[in-house]
Amino acid sequence: MQDNEIVDLYWARSENAITETNVKYGGYCRKIAMNIVANDEDSEECINDTYLSAWNTMPEERPDLLAPYLAAIVRNHALTLYRKLHSQKRGAGQTALALDELFEVASSSDTEDMVGRSLLSGHLNRFVAGLGTNDRLIFVRRYFYVDSLSDIASELSMSESAVKSQLFRTRQKLKDYLIREGYEL
Amino acid sequence: MNGNDLMDALSGLDPKYIDEAAFELHGKPVKRSPKKSKVLRGAFIALPIAAALLITVMVALPALFRMGTSSDTSMPSDTGSYAPASEEAASDASASYEAAEEPSWDYEAAEEPSYEEPVYSAETEAAADSAAEDTTNASASAKNESAASTETAESEEPSETETSGSGISAEYDNGILTIENITLPEDISEVGYRIVQTTATGTEIPYSEGSLEDILTETDPLTLDISELALYDGTYTITIGDEIAEFIVPE
């Protein structure tokens, strides 16, 4: 079923909307949730919350691409659950490692409010738009999808050390970019 | 702003970038695999060696055949092969050209000169003598080299003193150079590097040199960012301290 047809089901308040969403994007959402919470039970909880959020936001929202829309929702739910379970602890797991890497870019004690994060999203989009395709794929897989370095290396047919080096350089570029945009890091 | 803000703000990434990277939905991007690069690199190295061997064989074989071929025109060349036709000849056919004291199967006349006669055998003996001498010299030098390598091995140090740097290897991948089996001093601030391109004619063209710290991104394994050099495809050598490794930039 095409994305617009599934969105139409949401707008029509048809219960088949959830079923069709699960058929087409259940595995995709589950992968994102598992990358972040690393637990079957918790990832299922995130998936259920995602479908509920999708049901509550459509209508009103009519995304052109359903996959990224669901990906962002499940990611948010997974990060919320991760933080709830892990508090400020840092430990093993890709989420902790990815967060540590992003903390290398910015580690101020001041946090952004909702408006600030919205502005920051805009800056990040402009930054990512300026990256080469390969750098962008690595960056998005690592920090949006929270993939492991070995998975990214396998997906892009690169060595793990090459992925690690590219991420290091991209983070340096991001840091320089945010400083130029006036952020205090 | 901190890492948590960045992580959360990434949820607002443009959907097209999220979708672009959705390998679970669209499959993995098509890219030349490292294995294919290694195959190409292996072919790049193996082909000249194979060509040299082929030329050697093409030059040496006629000479060998001239030594063992008789003047009789009814030789296997008429049959299109060198396999003898008779059973007697078949038993003789397995003998080497140098070992046969009797003439080959198709002629028996002792008065006919054989290519094993002293005229040629003297030459072959001389060649064998010189080859034996070369072998002796080679084995003697090999013994000296092994004695020298034993001494260095006893010190339990990697081959840092070998200027050829046979121990280290370099692999180039998309602007990143990874060096294996290299030992660096604790203070690398004074370690320099030099990258030279080797052309097809053997000419060396200096490409870049400087402090290793300028291009270093990781120390274990040693990972160098040389993407800004924008190297063209070809063969290069990198010298780090006293160690040298060759790497190939693919097309």
Image: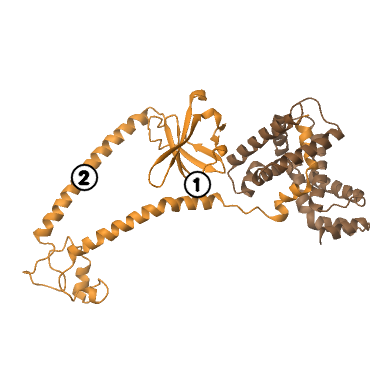
Chain colours: A brown, B orange
| Coordinates of residue A43 in the picture (x, y in percent) | 79, 45
Extreme-left residue of the structure: B111
Foreground pick, B229 / B51: B229
Could you tell me residue B74's position as x and y percent? 18, 76
| Above or below: residue B120 compared with residue B74 | above
Q: Is residue B67 left or right of residue A157?
A: left
How far apart in space, not on screen, are marks 1 and 2 (Cα)? 40 Å
| Residue A1, horizontal then vertical, whole percent | 81, 62
> From the viewer's perspective, is A166 left or right of A42?
left
Disc 2 marks which residue? B134
Whether residue A181 can be seen here = yes
The chain letter under disc 2 is: B
Q: Amino acid at mark 1?
A: Asp
- Residue labelled with disc 1: B233
Q: Secondary structure at mark 1?
A: loop
Give the class, few, some or many, for how many residues have Cα within 10 Å of label 1's Cα (few <14, many ≥20): few
Instruction: Judge depth for marks 1 and 2 and give the one in front.
Output: 1
For this rendering, which residue is in front, B237 or B110?
B237
Q: Residue B150's image quarter?
A: top left
Quadrant of residue B14 in the image? top right
Residue B80 vs residue A24, the one in the foreground:
B80
Q: Considering the numbered disc 2 on the image, is that residue within a helix, a strand or a loop?
A: helix
x, y percent for residue A140: 71, 43
Residue type at mark 2? Asp
Q: Earlier in the sequence, mark 1 or mark 2?
A: 2
Q: Which class describes the residues within 10 Å of circle 2: few (<14), some (14-19), or many (20+)?
A: few
Residue in the picture at 75% in, 46% down: A32
